[in-house]
Image (cartoon, grey):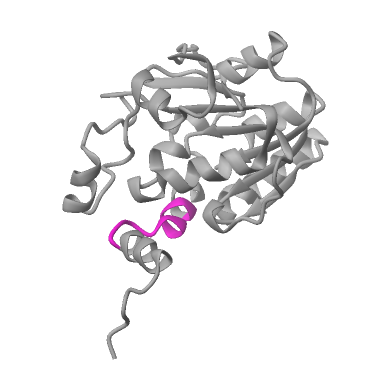
Amino acid sequence: MTKLITTMDDVMTMLDDMLREPTTFWNDFYTNREKEVPFFVNAPDENLVQYVEQGILHKGKVLELGCGAGRNALYLAKQGFDVRAVDLSSVALQWAKERAIEAQAHIQFEQANLFELPLKENHYDVIYDAGCLHHIAPHRRVQYVEIVQKALKKGGYFAVNCFAEHGAYGGSTMSDWEVYQQRSLQGGLSYTQEKLQVIFNDFQAIEIRPMKAIQQPSTIFGLDGFIVGIFRK
């Protein structure tokens, strides 16, 4: 018997199935640590360092969405933050755990789909996303914002790093409709200052700007073709 679509969860699952299965892709992506992938370096994002050094972000509870190999989680832990770092990829998390052991940093790493992640309400002082949003399909975007809104304390900060339009490493300008017509995110959707302001319009925008390119090797990381933003609940 053909399964009927009777709930919004059924609709979301159907739309998920139209696109690439993410867990297998990201496990394969992180398998070869010698690949020339810019963000495989062990250095935190320049914007995150700025927020800490300027005193915008203070020590507290942090949730990192899509932590990858843990470079930003490690930085925050070293600054005294209580860090919970989540990723779909068990392969990425193994690498992150090895880095944390080497640095003697205590971080709560967790393999999970963020849309199935159990979260306490008004619990986190900071939520950070370095490259997760641009891989979120349009039908999950509202749910993504709801998760951030639910988990963040009043007065807490949400910061994001995502593809800008026509970047060297991704940044498709396709419309939300085209995602489903083509059954692809084309490597990642692009965002502009205006789009981020619309998506996070229930938050106070503190700063939205292009990411600063940082020549590597360096103690901080930055690339052309990305946009960064920080918002207050």
Q: Going 56% across and 45% down the picture, which residue do you hit?
A: 147
- Quarter of the image where one finds residue 199: top left
> Is 232 one of the magenta-colored residues?
no
Q: Residue furthest bottom?
A: 1
Q: Position of residue 11 (x, y in %)?
A: 34, 64
Locate residue 82 relative to residue 132 in the image: left or right. Answer: right
Nearest to the observer: residue 101 or residue 175: 175
- Quarter of the image where one finds residue 159: top right
For the N terminus, which image quadrant? bottom left
Tell me if I can see residue 61 in this picture. yes
For the C terminus, which image quadrant? top right
Q: How many marks?
A: 0
Q: Going 16% across and 52% down the picture, which residue do you hit?
A: 181
Measured along the vertical axis of the image, is residue 125 above or below residue 214? below
Q: Position of residue 30 (x, y in %)?
A: 50, 47
Q: Position of residue 182 (x, y in %)?
A: 17, 51
Tell me if I can see residue 69 in this picture. no
Q: Which residues are magenta?
A: 18-27
Nearest to the observer: residue 90 or residue 15: 15
Q: Going 61% across and 29% down the picture, which residue do you hit?
A: 42
Q: Residue furthest top?
A: 54
Measured along the vertical axis of the image, is residue 17 above or below residue 160? below
Locate residue 33 relative to residue 86 in the image: left or right. Answer: left
Nearest to the observer: residue 5 or residue 161: 5
Q: Going 53% across and 44% down the picture, which residue do you hit?
A: 146
> Is 24 one of the magenta-colored residues?
yes
Nearest to the observer: residue 42 or residue 188: 188
Measured along the vertical axis of the image, is residue 10 above or below residue 130? below
Measured along the vertical axis of the image, is residue 38 above or below residue 99? above
Overall secondary structure of the magenta stretch? helix
Locate residue 106 relative to residue 25 in the image: left or right. Answer: right
Q: Position of residue 106 (x, y in %)?
A: 81, 40
